[in-house]
């Protein structure tokens, strides 16, 4: 159990450094291009990792998946997990639930950012 936490932490450290480096390469001007790129790239990466982890011919261990998906992708962007979870809902035919999850996540996420900002910027 401790080993898994350490793998996730190590991957998270790598992911956050990758996020910071990307933000330096794509500075924000009038549009958050770095964040958009990070979210899309992270979603693409977790899609590849999860696809490889479920293949019957894959030899990807649970610890490797934890390091790559939960650690690196999670540190790089949590949007990748959100995207993957929605893909799972859509693939299982739970279209209404996916739509609700997307709308509620975006609306409440924006509201939470606004609330936190207002609360600590009073």
Image (tube, helix red, strand yellow):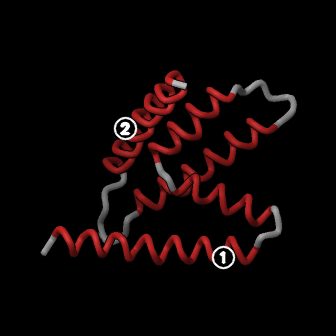
Which residue is under mark 2? 17
Q: Position of residue 62 (x, y in %)?
A: 67, 29
User: Between marks 1 and 2, how big is the CA–CA gap?
Assistant: 32 Å
Q: Position of residue 22 (x, y in %)?
A: 39, 46
In the picture, which quadrant includes the N terminus? top right
Frontmost residue, 8 versus 50: 8
In the picture, which quadrant includes the C terminus? bottom left
Q: Position of residue 20 (x, y in %)?
A: 34, 44
The residue at the far front in this view is: 1
The residue at the far top in this view is: 3
Frontmost residue, 112 versus 42: 112
Q: Nearer the viewer, mark 1 or mark 2?
A: 1
Up-down relation of residue 122 to residue 11 (above or below):
below
Up-down relation of residue 1 to residue 22 (above or below):
above
Up-down relation of residue 82 to residue 19 (above or below):
below
Do the CB atoms of the residues marked 1 and 2 lie less than 8 Å apart? no
Frontmost residue, 64 versus 19: 64
Badge number at residue 21:
none
Query: Horizontal placement of 37 versus 45: left or right?
Result: left
Q: Position of residue 36 (x, y in %)?
A: 47, 61
Which residue is under mark 1? 99
Nearest to N terminus: mark 1 or mark 2? 2
| Residue under the point 74% across and 36% down | 53
| Residue under the point 61% across and 45% down | 45
Callout 1 crowding tier (Cα within 10 Å): few <14, some 14–19, many ≥20: some
Q: Give residue 13's quadrant in the image.
A: top left
| Residue under the point 49% across and 29% down | 5
């Amino acid at each position: 159990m401790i080993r898994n936490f350490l793998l996730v932490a190590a991957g998270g450290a790598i992911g956050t450094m990758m996020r910071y480096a990307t933000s330096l390469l794509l500075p924000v001007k009038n549009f958050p291009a770095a964040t958009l790129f990070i979210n899309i790239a992270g979603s693409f990466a977790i899609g590849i990792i999860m696809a490889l982890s479920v293949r019957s011919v894959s030899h990807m261990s649970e610890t490797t998946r934890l390091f790559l998906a939960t650690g690196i992708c999670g540190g790089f962007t949590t949007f990748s997990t959100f995207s993957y979870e929605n893909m799972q809902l859509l693939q299982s035919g739970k279209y209404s639930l996916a739509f609700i999850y997307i709308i509620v996540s975006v609306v409440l996420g924006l509201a939470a950012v606004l609330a936190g900002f207002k609360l600590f910027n009073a």
